[in-house]
Amino acid sequence: MSIALEPQTAPQPDNADIVLSSEQNLDSTEQQAMWSQVTESVIKNGDISLAYSFIEHPKSRKAIVISSGRIESYIKYRELIFDLYRQGYSIYALDHRGQGLSSRTTDNPQQGHIDRFETYIDDFAHFIETVVKPKGYRDLFLVGHSMGGTIGTLYMERHPDTFRAAAFSAPMYGIKLPVGRRFIRWLARLLDTTDSNKGPNYILGGGDYESVEFAKNDLTHSQLRYENYKKLYQQHPQVQVGSPTNRWLHESIDAAHRAISAARNSPVPILILQADEDTVVDNFAQYHAVGGLCQLLNIPKARHEVYMEKDEARNFAVSALLKFLASHHS
């Protein structure tokens, strides 16, 4: 059950004037043509290679930076990038270290691992300073999903002058856990072998990447988008990542908790696009983040992957995102 929350400044999406892509026409000729114009590259941060992609809109001085979720790669965002680009934005998307096409940090490339959560933020800051800011955009916006929302929120706490506004779908301000957060954090720290000669280890019950059939997935109601996503990860096995490590878990629990107050006190306007049926992140934690310039819009009939949902829910969310960003143009 979700708590109804209607912030006074919440956008009221009207899909009539925004044409978006459809699950009935995935990988369309138009999308493929756009992707052929996308530049894929890497930057170094220390000994780590960070993969990223970008497409510059020829008629615009506004840009969006995408901060993706755990286990994700920018290749998963082709459809969203297509929709945002058609609305006049240049788009930049980074693969966080340890996932996507970026360098792995463990001997087992399947492990979702981070030494300190702040490392994600350091990488993101390096990407912004090295790749994005030199372009001199007039209006710069942030779009994040899940873990990418946590990274984005904590980045803006450090760098409040970079973005005009941010929209986060299903942000990880809390992780859906089987028992209390403090106990899971204590257990993950107890079991963490990162600093021993064993190296990082999976969480209890965790393991390498496994393909899950649609009927058992808890990410989306759209079978078409889900099967397309699975096919993409089968075609690019190098982007596959399995369960998180114990180090990732206790670091992320702490970071998610810090992000709540960072969002609530943010000097940058934030829109939370809450997936009503989310079983991955904690929706109640998102409510605690609301206040000041941080508002929330609940997306009915949506599981965790809002941008992979059926057209009705996805169109509602993307339209809300676009109208929110447009309200903060200079």
Image (cartoon, rainbow, N blue to C red):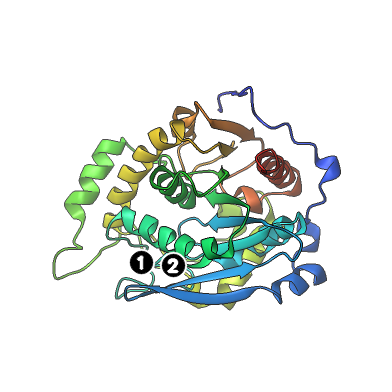
**Residue 42 placed where, x, y %?**
48, 76
Name the image quarter holding residue 40.
bottom right
Q: Residues within 10 Å of mark 1 (few under 14, many from 20)?
A: many
| Residue drawn 34% across the image and 49% down it | 252
| Residue drawn 48% across the image and 60% down it | 128
From this viewpoint, is residue 279 visible? yes
**Residue 251 placed where, x, y %?**
29, 50
Q: Secondary structure at mark 2?
A: loop
The three-letter code of the residue at mark 1 reads: Gln
Q: What distance separates the C-alpha of mark 2 from that of mark 1?
A: 9 Å
* Relative side of 206 to 156, left or right: left
| Residue drawn 55% across the image and 36% down it | 269
Assign the N terminus to one quadrant of the image: top right
157 vs 241: above or below: above
Furthest-left residue in this view: 196
- Residue topped by disc 2: 99
309 vs 135: above or below: above
**Residue 288 placed where, x, y %?**
44, 28
Q: Residues within 10 Å of mark 2 (few under 14, many from 20)?
A: many
Image disc number at residue 17: none
- Residue topped by disc 1: 111
| Residue drawn 75% across the image and 64% down it | 26
Give the mark nearest the N terminus, 2 or 1: 2
* Relative side of 23 to 293, left or right: right
How many labels sit on residues? 2
The three-letter code of the residue at mark 2 reads: Gln
Assign the C terminus to one quadrant of the image: top right
